[in-house]
Image (cartoon, helix red, strand yellow):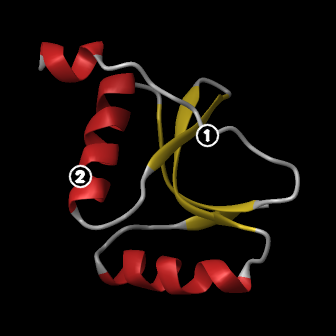
Amino acid sequence: INTHTASLEIQFEGVKKDLKYAIVGCFADVNNAKNYVNQLTTNGFDAKFLDFNNGLYRISIESSTSIDSLQNTIHRATQKGYNTWILK
């Protein structure tokens, strides 16, 4: 375990009622979630911990008031091999 990574505090963006989110991963293990956020960031995405829901850390790469405006980010993520879904 990388103790430096494990010791980093998580800041949750939090789900806001009027926004939609491009979600790229959900993890039960916080260290797996942190590693994924680091990987996404290295690949040019603005990856964030969205929240902790039903025992899972949800990772978002973009939020918007419209689904249409998420499409470019979702397309780019798909091209890089990331499965993405929209949280409404």
- Asked if the residues shown at circle 1 and circle 2 are in contact, with their CB atoms under 8 angstroms apart, the answer is no
- Which residue is label 2 attached to? 39
Could one spot residue 1 in this view of the protein? no
> Can you tell which quarter of the image residue 85 is in?
bottom right
Look at the picture and state if 5 lies above or below 14.
above
| Element carrying mark 1 | loop
Which quadrant is the N terminus positioned in?
top left
Residue 11, percent from left and from top: 51, 29
Residue projecting furthest to the right: 17
Is tag 1's residue or tag 2's residue first in the polypeptide sequence?
1
Where is residue 28 drawn, in percent x and y? 46, 27
How many neighbours does mark 2 have within 10 angstroms: few (below 14), some (14-19), or many (20 or more)? few
Q: Residue at x 39, y 24 (%)?
A: 30
Numbered disc total = 2
Residue 25 in view in this figure: yes
Give the structural element (helix, strand or loop) at label 2: helix
Q: Residues within 10 Å of mark 1 (few under 14, many from 20)?
A: few
The picture places residue 83, in percent across and down from the top left corner, at 44, 67
Picture layout, residue 42 above or below residue 70 = above
Foreground of the two, 73 or 58: 73
Residue drawn at (37%, 64%) of the image: 45
Percent position (x, y) of residue 41? 29, 55
Q: Which mark is residue 74?
A: none
Placement of the C terminus among the 4 image quadrants = bottom right
Which amino acid is tagged 2? Gln
The amino acid beneath tag 1 is Glu
Residue 13: numbered disc:
1
**Viewed as shown, does residue 19 lie left or right of 8?**
right
Q: CA distance from mark 1 to mark 2?
A: 18 Å
